[in-house]
Each structure stands twice: as structure tokens, then as C-alpha cells.
Image (spheres, grey):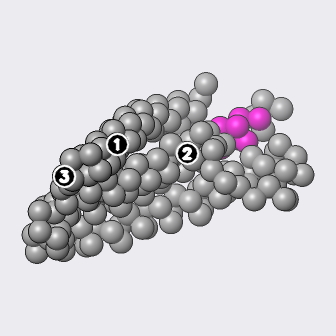
């Protein structure tokens, strides 16, 4: 295994860890929703902060889950043309799209989200609802971290595809 593959696999291992954390957040979200429903309908109790926490967790799960989904190649792909290409052509498409489209766009969105988070922190943004959650900047920071994770995973894909593409050339 060459250095490119090792680095790509290291990033994959980190994204796997993030995926495991995200799966536990999903379980927590399900339990939170079930508890909220039980309390609301059985005891007429509810809390604004708990309802807000539900959608905050959903946002984190979606933003962090994107990178894991990309790593597992479980995303939706339009296979009309892709399916008919040779494995080598598909490798090139994966390499070029990860390197020149996915990674740059992901890192750019992460970069653009930083002022969004900073502004929220600076003004001490909180929920507009009485009893809602404070520190809204924490939630917004997951936009930054989610797209950074997707950018990292895109680099891992590009590295492993480069090792596959350029490794074959040296061997052959």
C-alpha cells in the first residue's frame, strides 16, 4: 500500500468514527422523540428546549452523516451514463470529481459558513422561543464541521483513486 492509500485510509478511519458517533446521535434522537411524544400525549407535558434539541440533532446527523454516506458510496448517483463506463473511466471520474468538484466546493462552503457562526456567537444568538435553547452558534458550527468532513472525505476518495490510477501505470 502506498502513501496515498494510507493517508486516504486514515481519513476513512476518522470518518468511520464520525459515522459511529452520528449513529449514536440518531439513537438518542429517536429516544428523545419517543419520550417527548409519551410526555406530551400521556401527561400533557412538553418542553420547547426538547423540541428544539430534536431538530438540532437532526441537523447534526445530516451534516455529519454526509461524509460517512460518501465514504460508504451510499449516496444517490445518476448511473445512466456512469454504469456503462469501463472501471478505468469510472476511476477517473471519481478522481476528477472528488479533486476538482467535491473537495473544493465542500471546503468553500465550510469557509463561507465561518462568518455565519462568528456572527451568531458575537450577538449571543439564542432561540427566539421562550424556554428554547441558547448558544445557537454551536448548532451553526456544524455547518462548518460537516462540510469540512465532506471535504476531507472527498480528499480521501481522490487520494485512493490517484493511487489506483497512477499505481497501475507504474506497475504495467
Q: Which residue is mark 3?
A: 45
Between circles 1 and 3, the one closer to the viewer is 3
Q: Position of residue 128 (x, y in %)?
A: 17, 73
In contact (CB < 8 Å): disc 1 and disc 3: no
**Nearest to N terminus: mark 1 or mark 2:** 1
Front residue of 30 and 157: 30
Which part of the image, by quadrant, shows the N terminus? Answer: top right
Q: In terms of depth relative to the viewer, which is nearer, 151 or 73?
A: 73
Circle number at residue 34: 1
Residue at mark 1 to residue at mark 3: CA–CA distance:
13 Å
Front tag of 2 and 3: 3
- Residue 142 visible from this viewpoint: no
Q: Position of residue 139 (x, y in %)?
A: 26, 59
Q: Which residue appears at 37% of the width and 57% of the height?
A: 59
- Determine whether the residue tagged by mark 1 lies in a helix, strand or loop: helix
Mark 2–mark 3 Cα distance, whole angstroms, equals: 36 Å
Local crowd size for mark 3, using a 10 Å CA cut-off: few (<14), some (14–19), many (≥20) = few
Q: Which residues are magenta?
A: 162-168
Q: Residue at x 74, y 46 (%)?
A: 91
Query: In this image, 170 relative to 20: left or right?
Result: right
User: What label does residue 98 carry, if any?
Assistant: none
Within 10 Å of disc 2 (Cα), the crowding (few <14, some 14-19, many 20+) is some
Residue 169 coordinates in the image, percent (x, y) = 78, 38
Q: Is residue 121 magenta?
A: no
Amino acid at each position: 500500500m502506498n502513501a496515498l492509500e494510507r493517508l486516504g485510509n486514515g481519513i476513512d478511519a476518522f470518518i468511520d468514527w464520525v459515522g459511529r458517533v452520528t449513529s449514536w446521535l440518531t439513537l438518542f434522537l429517536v429516544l428523545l422523540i419517543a419520550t417527548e411524544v409519551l410526555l406530551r400525549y400521556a401527561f400533557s407535558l412538553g418542553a420547547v428546549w426538547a423540541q428544539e434539541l430534536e431538530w438540532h440533532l437532526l441537523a447534526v446527523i445530516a451534516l455529519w452523516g454526509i461524509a460517512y454516506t460518501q465514504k460508504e458510496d451510499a449516496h444517490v448517483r445518476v448511473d445512466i451514463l456512469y454504469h456503462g463506463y469501463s472501471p478505468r473511466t469510472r476511476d477517473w471520474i471519481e478522481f476528477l470529481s472528488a479533486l476538482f468538484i467535491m473537495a473544493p466546493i465542500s471546503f468553500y462552503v465550510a469557509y463561507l459558513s465561518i462568518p455565519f457562526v462568528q456572527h451568531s456567537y458575537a450577538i449571543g444568538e439564542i432561540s427566539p422561543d421562550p424556554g428554547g435553547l441558547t448558544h445557537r452558534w454551536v448548532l451553526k458550527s456544524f455547518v462548518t464541521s460537516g462540510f469540512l468532513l465532506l471535504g476531507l472525505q472527498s480528499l480521501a476518495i481522490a487520494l485512493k483513486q490517484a493511487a489506483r490510477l497512477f499505481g497501475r501505470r507504474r506497475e504495467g
